[in-house]
Amino acid sequence: MMNYTDFQVDLNGGSNIPSYLTGTMINGGPSLFKIGKYSLGNYGDGFVRFNKYTVDAKNAKMLFSTKLVDDTKYYKASTKA
């Protein structure tokens, strides 16, 4: 799974974006459930990934960033792969 920083996303119909839709939204949640032989069976146990969406309605642009959190559990599982 890749990490991206300020990846520009083409918005189809960008001229239809309402002007109030400008700003940044950050969300997080589980995203990776298997690394090599190590796997997780519960949705809440997945390795955490944060996503950031920055929308500029005036210029019809959106930037996307995503990062898989490199915690100790992730490191240990990835070295066992």
Image (spheres, rainbow, N blue to C red):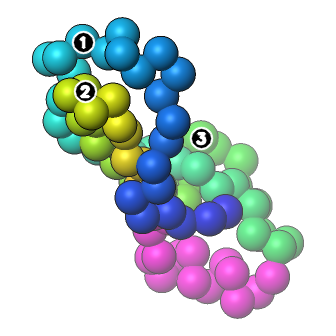
- Please indicate whether residue 38 sits to the left or right of residue 54 in the image: right
Q: Position of residue 81 (x, y in %)?
A: 81, 82
Q: Are marks 2 and 1 in contact (CB under 8 Å)?
A: yes
Q: Amino acid at mark 3?
A: Tyr
Q: Tell me the tag on residue 18.
A: 1
Q: Amino acid at mark 1?
A: Pro
Residues packed near mark 3 inside 10 Å, few (<14), some (14 to 19) or many (20 plus) = few
Mark 3 and mark 2: span between their CA atoms? 34 Å
Residue located 71% across and 47% down the image: 41
Q: Position of residue 14 (x, y in %)?
A: 41, 21
Q: Is residue 31 visible?
A: yes
Element type at mark 3 = helix
Q: Amino acid at mark 2?
A: Ala
Element type at mark 2 = loop
Taking the magenta stretch, the answer to whether it contains residue 27 is no
Which residue occupies the foreground of this view, 54 or 50?
A: 54
